[in-house]
């Protein structure tokens, strides 16, 4: 029941909306011009950034994800966009990717590297990047050091590896990469693109499931997440890290 409610709750939230995609474009524009590159999008989900990468690069893009429902949605989007000749949806785990070494010009990931961890992801995924190719990571970060205990405990429970931008920058060389550039996303982005729409959906579903205590309990837990964000949004957000595989990689 809880999985069904969460799926209904998050269905069609504008997390891949135009404001988010503009930062995918910004990160891509920090890469040098490449002629029809091969790109791997790890943890592609429903494929919003993946399709944008195909349009921007005019290359071949593989979207990898473990969730069949998200991949089915992604595959439908690919067909509707007329990109089936250049974009492929692949079901697989980021922990056990079987692509050839050095196959991709770019390995890209947005909001997914937390599953494996920033350092481990860079170290393990470098092997799939050609010499002097690129890795681009959109990652959750602390926007300021020393966050309040309530939000620190919340994020450490969900993502123990969450770090500040300077801490992640210090890790890049040890992971076999050189920094090309980085930028943080605006502090209000996650309210307009996720938490605000999520709160409105919670209100709608509370009416629909008013007689279902189990569903209401799930919705109450999601509302607590929203309230935490309202109180502490200046402390956490996300950033893009654009990196080039070095001779150490």
Image (spheres, helix red, strand yellow):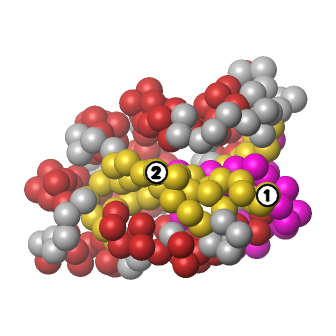
Give the answer, above or below, for where 29 lies relative to 234: above
Span colored in magenta: 87-113
Residue position for label 1: 130
Give the answer, above or below, for where 85 lies relative to 199: above
What percent of the width, then of the height, locates residue 110?
53, 51
Q: Quadrant of residue 86?
A: top right
Say whether residue 136 is magenta.
no
Residue depicted at x 19% and y 64%: 144
Nearer to the camera, 215 or 246: 246
Please state, as top left, top right, bottom left or bottom right, where the C terminus lies in the image: bottom right
Give the answer, above or below, for where 191 lies relative to 97: above
Q: Residues within 10 Å of mark 2 (few under 14, many from 20)?
A: some
Left/right placement of residue 176 relative to residue 199 reads: right
Say whether residue 111 is magenta.
yes
Q: CA distance from mark 1 to mark 2?
A: 19 Å
What percent of the width, then of the height, locates residue 68?
71, 52
Q: Residues within 10 Å of mark 1 (few under 14, many from 20)?
A: some
Residue depicted at x 56% and y 57%: 243
Residue depicted at x 46% and y 51%: 181
Residue position for label 2: 181
Count of numbered labels shown in the rendering: 2
What percent of the width, then of the height, locates residue 36?
80, 33
Q: Kindly identify which numbered label has been placed on residue 169.
A: none
Q: Secondary structure at mark 2?
A: strand
What percent of the width, then of the height, locates residue 147?
16, 71
Q: Secondary structure at mark 1?
A: strand
Residue depicted at x 44% and y 58%: 139
Going from N to C along the chain, the mark reached first, 1 or 2, is: 1
Left/right placement of residue 44 relative to residue 21 reads: right
């Amino acid at each position: 029941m809880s999985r069904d409610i969460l799926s209904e709750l998050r269905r069609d939230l504008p997390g891949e909306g135009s404001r988010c995609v503009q930062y995918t474009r910004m990160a891509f524009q920090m890469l040098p011009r490449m002629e029809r590159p091969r790109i791997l999008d790890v943890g592609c989900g429903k494929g919003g950034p993946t399709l944008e990468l195909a349009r921007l690069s005019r290359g071949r893009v593989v979207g990898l994800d473990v969730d069949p429902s998200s991949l089915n949605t992604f595959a439908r989007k690919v067909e509707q966009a007329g990109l089936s000749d250049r974009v492929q949806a692949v079901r697989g785990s980021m922990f056990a990717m079987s692509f050839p070494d050095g196959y991709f010009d770019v390995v890209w990931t947005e909001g997914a590297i937390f599953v494996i961890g920033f350092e481990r992801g860079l170290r393990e995924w470098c092997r799939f990047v050609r010499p002097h190719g690129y890795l681009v990571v959109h990652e959750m970060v602390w926007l300021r050091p020393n966050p309040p205990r309530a939000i620190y405990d919340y994020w450490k429970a969900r993502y123990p590896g969450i770090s500040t931008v300077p801490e992640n920058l210090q890790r890049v060389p040890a992971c076999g990469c050189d920094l090309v550039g980085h930028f943080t996303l605006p502090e209000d982005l996650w309210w307009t693109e996720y938490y605000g729409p999520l709160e409105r959906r919670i209100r709608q579903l509370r009416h629909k499931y008013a007689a279902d205590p189990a569903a209401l309990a799930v919705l109450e837990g999601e509302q607590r997440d929203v309230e935490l964000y309202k109180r502490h949004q200046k402390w956490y957000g996300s950033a893009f890290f654009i990196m080039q595989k070095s001779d150490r990689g």
